[in-house]
Image: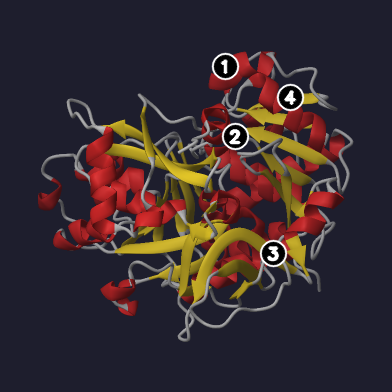
């Protein structure tokens, strides 16, 4: 029997029909009701002439309609493309042209953006997720269709989802995630962390990120209630954790930092809360300890879209002394460090490219065989991250392979330098990149954003480096800036910083 992720929802509705599946600002549905809504959407797509293998796109913040549509589409083999709502119309136009989606489900607040992409690619049909638009409303569409379970089409290795990578160095690529990938990734989550029947999960991370989407499938798999929050608001998160007795949620470090800024949080009743899952960038031990002081746990996750989510987890049970690592691989997963050139595994503790193994590895990039060949090695995903795997299996991410600086034959990992400079109280953000140098080939340069009201000099930054790092790792120049260039998902565009420095080569 081939796994169809729409079938996961049908099975959960059969086992737990009256259990609340999701809570949105304006709705509360049981698993039976969500499954019926997904069935209605599947029948609607069929009536519109969409067939297995066709694509639909979704442009919306976190809403029940998004995941209901995804499950409904999956039941009949239609692939869902989740669009980043922070992108501009021209950026979305490229993605829609690349994936060839025939239908767009969108939230009405993005109506102006949608007006700029109505002629994009193969788009034929437009459905509003929440009314207030000239197009058919999602609820109206569902009313026209049957609640009967459709014949399941597709599954297994067939595409279920396409998620476009952020494209920090070029055009976004569509990572194709299969039904099998989703199934095994959800098993990995629920067998690695405590993820129990009737738990309550707060969805804050955006659904266009794998960190936002992957937990949805785990919740259906084991029967958890998902609480949807359209956008992140620190106060609203704390309020929801208390009022709805939430067990866990997915965050990024910036969210956790913002939540700490609110007064009175030490007085909140969080007796039912289990832990924050935090990823997207390294989680400082000091941040973990601040939450520990409040009696709250933080779990670190290292993940990738191409791995259908989580790769490794660090939990407090592994010891605070291991908090600087990414933890151990997820259930049914494996990580090896390899030589980028030869593909040979390096000895424990030596730096290599982290290569990911397991049934969670994606199928490849949509209509991009060259990029797929570069990304996959004998069925494993080459992450592009440099790191180590020690004798106990703990994974440490050192840096991005493409970001490594080679200065006078020595390898410099910008992330290590950034971690040191981030400890300066005047530094709000920092990015270290290589700049061409006539003598050394490359030298490290720090681009620094200072905290409001703080002042800092180049000499102070360089001196701080020298106190904490070997001489060859120390930055040779400092560029002070009001902000760092970022893409729509908040990742720093180091390529743009490198381009800035190309005309400023040193000749010491």
Q: Tell me whether the residue at label 4 lies in contact with that at label 2, contact meaning CB atoms closer than 8 angstroms.
A: no
Q: Can residue 427 be seen in this view?
A: yes
Residue carrying label 4: 93
Residue 263 appears at what percent x and percent y? Answer: 12, 40
Task: Kindly identify which residue carries mark 2.
Answer: 84
Say whether disc 4 or disc 3 marks the residue closer to the N-terminus: 4
Query: Is residue 112 placed above or below 121 in the rendered structure?
Result: above
Q: Where is residue 17 in the image (x, y as percent from the top left)?
A: 55, 60
- Left or right: residue 373 compared with residue 130: right
Q: What element carries label 4?
A: helix
Q: Name the residue under label 3.
A: 381
Look at the numbered disc 1 and give the secondary structure of its residue: loop
In whole angstroms, how far apart are the C-alphas of marks 3 and 1?
43 Å
Label whose residue precedes the other's in the sequence (4 or 2): 2
- Label 3: state its secondary structure: strand
SS assignment at label 2: loop
Is there any visible trace of residue 244 in the rendered image?
A: no
Residue 132 - label? 1
Q: Is residue 394 above or below residue 436?
A: below
Q: Check the picture and name the quadrant holding the C terminus.
A: top left
């Amino acid at each position: 029997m081939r796994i169809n992720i729409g079938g996961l929802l049908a099975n959960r509705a059969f086992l737990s029909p009256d259990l609340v599946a999701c809570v949105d600002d304006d709705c509360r549905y049981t698993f039976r009701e969500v499954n019926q809504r997904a069935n209605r959407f599947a029948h609607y797509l069929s009536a519109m002439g969409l067939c297995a293998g066709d694509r639909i796109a979704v442009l919306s913040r976190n809403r029940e309609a998004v995941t209901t549509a995804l499950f409904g589409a999956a039941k009949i083999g239609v692939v869902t493309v989740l669009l980043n709502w922070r992108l501009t119309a021209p950026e979305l136009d490229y993605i829609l042209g690349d994936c060839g989606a025939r239908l767009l489900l969108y939230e009405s607040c993005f109506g102006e953006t949608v007006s700029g992409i109505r002629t994009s690619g193969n788009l034929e049909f437009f459905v509003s997720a929440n009314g207030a638009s000239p197009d058919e409303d999602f609820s109206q569409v569902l009313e026209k269709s049957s609640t009967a379970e459709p014949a399941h089409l597709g599954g297994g290795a067939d595409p279920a989802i396409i998620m476009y990578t952020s494209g920090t160095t070029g055009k976004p690529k569509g990572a194709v995630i299969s039904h099998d990938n989703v199934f095994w990734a959800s098993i990995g989550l629920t067998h690695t962390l405590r993820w129990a029947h009737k738990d309550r999960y707060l969805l804050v991370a955006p659904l266009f990120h794998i960190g936002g989407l992957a937990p949805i499938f785990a919740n259906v798999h084991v029967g958890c209630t998902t609480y949807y929050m359209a956008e992140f608001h620190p106060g609203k998160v704390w309020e929801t954790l208390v009022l709805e007795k939430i067990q866990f949620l997915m965050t990024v470090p910036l969210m956790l930092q913002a939540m700490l800024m609110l007064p009175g949080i030490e007085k909140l009743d969080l007796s039912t809360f289990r832990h924050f899952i935090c990823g997207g960038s390294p989680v400082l031990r000091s941040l973990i300890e601040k939450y520990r002081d409040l009696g709250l746990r933080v779990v670190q996750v290292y993940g990738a879209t191409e791995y259908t989510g989580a790769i490794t987890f660090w939990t407090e049970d592994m010891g605070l002394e291991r908090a600087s690592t990414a933890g151990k691989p997820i259930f049914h997963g494996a990580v090896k460090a390899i030589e980028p050139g030869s593909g040979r595994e390096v000895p424990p503790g030596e730096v290599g490219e982290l290569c990911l193994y397991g049934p969670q590895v994606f199928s490849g990039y949509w209509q991009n065989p060259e990029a797929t060949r570069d990304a996959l090695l004998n069925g494993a995903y080459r992450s592009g991250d440099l790191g180590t795997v020690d004798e106990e299996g703990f994974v440490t991410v050192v840096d991005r392979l493409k970001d490594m600086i080679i200065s006078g034959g020595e390898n410099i990992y910008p992330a290590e330098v950034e971690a040191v400079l981030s400890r300066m109280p005047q530094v709000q953000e920092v990015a270290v990149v290589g700049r061409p140098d006539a003598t050394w080939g490359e030298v490290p340069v720090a681009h620094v954003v200072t905290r409001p009201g703080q002042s800092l000099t180049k000499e102070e930054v360089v001196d701080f480096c020298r106190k904490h790092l070997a001489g060859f790792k120390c930055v040779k120049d400092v560029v002070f800036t009001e902000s760092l260039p970022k893409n729509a998902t908040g990742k720093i565009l180091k390529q743009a910083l490198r381009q800035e420095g190309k005309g400023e080569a040193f000749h010491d």
